Image (tube, rainbow, N blue to C red):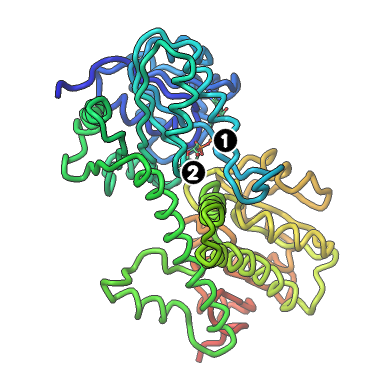
Amino acid sequence: MAKYTGTICCLGAGYVGGPTMTKIAEKCTDVKVIVSDLNQARIDAWNSDTLPIYEPGLEEIVKAARGKNLFFTTDVGAAIKEAGIVFVAVPTPTKMYGFGAGCAADMTYWELAARQIAEVSESPKIIVEKSTVPVKTASAMARVLDAQGGTKFVVLSNPEFLAEGTAMKDLENPDRVLIGGPQTDEGHKAVASLVSVYERWVPRDQILTTNVWSAELSKLVANAFLAQRISSVNSLSAFCESSGAHIEDVSRSIGTDPGIGKKFLNPSPGFGGSCFQKDILNLVYLCKSVGLDDVAEYWNQVVVMNDYQKERFAKKIVDAMFNTVKGKKIAILGFAFKKDTGDTRETPAIGICNVLLEENAQISIYDPKVSEQQARQDLGNHKNITWAPSVYDATEGAHALVVVTEWDEFRTLDFAKIYKQMLKPSFVFDGRNILPHKELVNMGFEVHKIGSPGPLKFD
Ligand SMILES: NC(=O)c1ccc[n+]([C@@H]2O[C@H](COP(=O)([O-])OP(=O)(O)OC[C@H]3O[C@@H](n4cnc5c(N)ncnc54)[C@H](O)[C@@H]3O)[C@@H](O)[C@H]2O)c1
């Protein structure tokens, strides 16, 4: 199969569309890549010096390719017309109304995208599902596309496995690229075309090809398994706190078993991000819709446990501070759902701050990448919030500091300075277990972490 050298376009210039298309443009200099979005502000930002999303390594590649073979536009129709391969990376949030509310995926954006592709296309196209979608979305999409008659479309599933914060590394060296296609001659040809794009930098044996449904389901299952590990560790962190065991010791001990592996065994105040919860709920909905209620309930517990952990961490703060945080200044260190991203979607920080705000605390938040406007919006513009330009501003006159995001800069702060300027007793709640706990205890802090009985004591 000849390598694909036509134009590629992508609908959706978000956390997935932006980085994935940038990587394709970098690796396929003979391919024109157009990233299109309906959101003018987002496209303006992609065309400016301040990109709309933060990912380590992204800015350099965008600046090198932009205007050469990488373009950002709101003219979605023209982008579709010009392209032979159309990626669709639009949102698939949890549906909040009607049948399946709170569980099923809301496919409104998807259907609109399909209708737009059908309306403007004048030549045959390969349509690539990049968004995470329910199983059998490709067949629904094919029906919408084919209903227009005339133009030929083949719909492939090519779910994205990048993780925010390491997106550019993940795209450079993916564990695998997964492409699902119809098991027909046309389907095989379309799959080969897309393989020829990735093959420029991904070894062929790491490009897996399956039928469409296996590819769609694999993405939901991958996220469900990763989230399940986090909930499993977090459930045991609660047990460690009541029993005298330390969760790090347990994680290290079990992680040496190759059947378990070392990754995703860190305790936390719960997982966040736009994907894990919505993808599990989607899987739950799909299982229920085929009558597999027990299977659905099994996966649902992963989300239940995550909610439990978020609430448990917030309650631990209030309990330790003599059961009242009313009027007390509490410094929140980190608001993003993980380090190296400015993304706050489903961040555990929202739930934790909301509990503290309900208890009438004064919250001072610092995060190196999240915008003040975004965090204020996430917390309903509550009046008891201040936005701090540094950790030192956030902790000045505070009763407690709470680590919510595992930013590296929190590991090496001037803790003596922080201790001096905080009220006494000075509480530390380390939701990521990244601070030098022994040093802090020796300085005089009262330290609580996840997965060990608190306050911490060292002999
Ligand atoms: N964020 C992640 O880490 C990640 C990883 C893997 C998969 N995914 C999946 O990828 C999909 C996109 O996620 P995201 O985080 O990039 O979302 P996002 O909200 O950051 O970006 C989606 C963009 O699509 C645009 N859009 C909506 N309808 C459009 C249309 N008809 N034409 C053009 N643009 C349109 C929106 O304006 C928005 O800018 C979701 O299904 C998500 O589950 C996300």
Residue 422 place in picture, x, y as percent: 70, 67
Q: Is residue 213 above or below residue 454?
A: above
Is residue 269 visible in this depiction of the protein?
no
Residue beneath the point at 73% across and 62% down: 330
Q: Which sits in the foreground, 120 or 359?
A: 120
Find disc 2 in the rendering and name its residue: 134
| In the displayed structure image, the side of residue 391 where residue 127 appears, left or right | left
| In the displayed structure image, the side of residue 118 where residue 210 appears, left or right | left
Is residue 161 visible in this depiction of the protein?
yes
Residue 150 place in picture, x, y as percent: 41, 10
Q: Which sits in the foreground, 90 or 33?
A: 90
Q: How many residues crowd mark 2 within 10 Å: few (<14), some (14–19), many (20+)? A: many
- Is disc 2 in contact with disc 1, using a CB cutoff of under 8 Å? yes
Q: CA distance from mark 2 to mark 1?
A: 9 Å
The disc label shown at residue 67, or none: none
Q: Amino acid at mark 1?
A: Met
**Which quarter of the figure has residue 272?**
bottom right
Q: Quadrant of the N terminus?
A: top left
Residue 429 place in picture, x, y as percent: 62, 70
How many numbered marks have been drawn onto this rendered protein structure?
A: 2
| In the displayed structure image, the side of residue 423 where residue 217 appears, left or right | left
Residue 276 place in picture, x, y as percent: 51, 53
Q: Earlier in the sequence, mark 2 or mark 1?
A: 1
| In the displayed structure image, the side of residue 221 where residue 268 appears, left or right | right
**Which quarter of the figure has residue 208?**
top left
The disc label shown at residue 107, or none: 1
Q: Is residue 24 above or below residue 374?
A: above
